[in-house]
Image: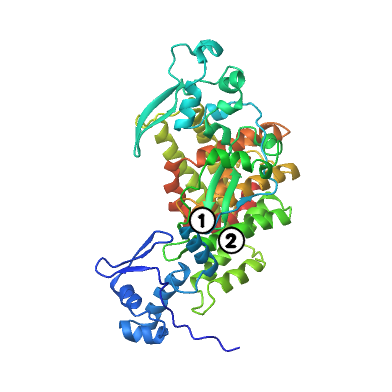
Amino acid sequence: MVLKPFCPRLRPELRLHPQQRWLRDPLTRLELALDPGSLAVVQALDGTRGPAELAQQAGLSRGAVETVLRRLLLLHLLEGAGQETVETLRALQAGNHELPFSVLREGRFACQGSGACCRSYGRCELDDDDLATISSLDLGSALPELAGTPWFEALPTSGGVRKFLASRNGVCVFLLESGLCGLHAAFGEAVKPKVCRLYPYTVLHTVIGVKVYDQGECARFATSSRSGPPVSEELERIQELVGPTRTLYHPVVRAGSQLHFDFGIFLRLQKELVGRIARAPLTAVACLLQAARLQRSLFDALAGCPLQVGQPEKLVQTVLAADCPAVAPTKAALAAGAQACAGLCDQLREVLHSSLHDPETPLRRGMRAQIEGSLEVLAALGQRATSKAADALLSGPELPSGPKLPSGPELDALFRISFRQTLFGDFAMVQERPRAGLLRLALGFLLSLQAMAGRSTDPLQHFDAGHSLALRVLRRHELDGVFVAFEEHVWDVFEALPELVA
C-alpha cells in the first residue's frame, strides 16, 4: 500500500506569535515555546512540504526537522493528529458536547466510621451553600460541647480569603469521641459539607468523560472499598455535589526530558492499564510489572514515532494491543534497582523529617503521627533494599533484610483494586510525569507491605494501616520533587520488585 505523503500543516485554530516565539493552542491552553530553529520549521508548515523540503526551507538538518515535527505530532498540533481528541475538544469549546461519566466497574464505598479522615487530612473548604446550611442549624442545642467554639475559620490563600471547617488539636470540631461526625449524628448526612459527603470519591473532568473514583485513602480501605452501593448508582448524588463542569484536565504529559505528548494518548494508556489488571487476576507484583512494561514500550515507541499520516494513533493502537514479554534482568540491573529504591527511601525520609519541623506548615495530629510512622517504615524498607542490592552483586557482608514481606491471594485482590483506582485517575502521574507516578505507586506498594511485615500471622489485620500510611504520606506535595528526581531509575526499580518482596 502506498502511503500518503506526509506534508504537515498546523491545526487551523493554533496561534503563532513569532516575535515572542511561542505557539498557542486555544483548545488546551498550551503555550509551546519555540527556539529559532523550531520557529523556522513551524513558519514553513503550509501542507505542501515534506521533511526534506522543510529542512531546506528552514536551513536545518533533516534530523533536526524531524525532531520538531515529531514533537508537534505527539502534541496533536498538526492537522489530523489526535483527530478524535481534537474534535471532542472543539465540541466542548463550542458547547456542543456533554461529557459522560466514567467509572470503574468494581468501584464502591461504605463508611466504616473510623473518623480518620477527620483527623489526618488538611483543611476542609466550605462553599456558600455549606456555610448557609450549617449556620441555620441549632448547634448549641444539638452539640452543647461546641458552645462558644467557632466552627469555621477564614484563612488567606493564593486565591483570596477562603473559609474552612475549624479544628481543635488537629481534629475537626464536629468529630465526636465515638469517631462519628457530630453534624451527621445530630442532623443527618445532608447537612455535612459537600467535600465530606463526596469523600472518598474525587472527580476529574477529561476529554473522554468525567472520571469518578475512590482516592483509596480510607483508613478502612479493605472493607470500605468492597462495601456499599456501586459508584455507578451514586452518580446522581455525586453530580449534585460537584455542580457544573469544572475546568477540563488536559495537561502535556512528560515522559522524559525530550518526550512530551498530548494527554489524550495517556488516557488511552490508562484505559488499557486498568483493563489489563481487571482481565487477568495476577499477583500484585505481576500487575505492577505489566503496567511498567506497557508504559515503557509505549514511551519507547513514541520517541521514534513515524512521521506519517495517521500517526500517532496507529502506533498507539499497535503498542497497546501487543503483549510485553518479560526479559530477565541481569544481576547488575537488579542491584541498580534495589540501590535506587534505597536511595529513594533515604531522600523521602529527609524531606519528611524536615516537614515535621517546619513551623510554616503545621501538621494535623493524625498526619504528624502517620509521617512519624512512615519514617520508621521507610528506614526498614531502605535497609531491605540495600541488603537485596548487596545480595544481587554477591559482594560485601550479608546484611539483614528484615522480616519476610507478606503475600497471598486476598492481599493481591486488595492491591488490584488500589492499583486500578490509582492508574485510573490523576494520581497516575506526579507533576504530569507518568514515570514518577509509577515510581510512587511501586514504593507505596512496598511501603504498605513493609508496614505489615512481622506484625501478626494475619497481614490483613494490618493492611489498612499500611495502605493508608503509604498513600496519604507519599502523596504529600513536598515529596513530588523526590519522585521526579528519581524517575530515571523507574524501570530498574520495577524489575527489582520481585527480588525486593522475596
Nearer to us of marks 1 and 2 is 2
Seen in the picture, residue 241 relative to 52 is either above or below; the reply is above
Seen in the picture, residue 452 relative to 25 is either above or below; the reply is above
Give the residue displayed 42% in from the left and 40% down from the top. Answer: 351
* Dot label at residue 434: 1
- How far across and down, in percent of the image, does residue 139 sit? 51, 15
Q: Determine crowd level at label 2: few under 14, some 14-19, many 20+ residues with C-alpha closer than 10 A.
A: many
Q: Is residue 271 left or right of residue 312?
A: right
Looking at this view, is 412 or 380 the one in front? 412
Residue that carries the numbered disc 2 in the rendered image: 269
Q: Secondary structure at mark 1?
A: helix
Residue type, numbered disc 1:
Pro
Q: Are marks 1 and 2 in contact (CB under 8 Å)?
A: yes
Answer yes or no: is residue 394 visible: no
Give the residue displayed 73% in from the left and 56% down from the top. Answer: 280
Answer yes or no: is residue 334 visible: yes
- How far across and down, in percent of the image, does residue 20 sit? 26, 65
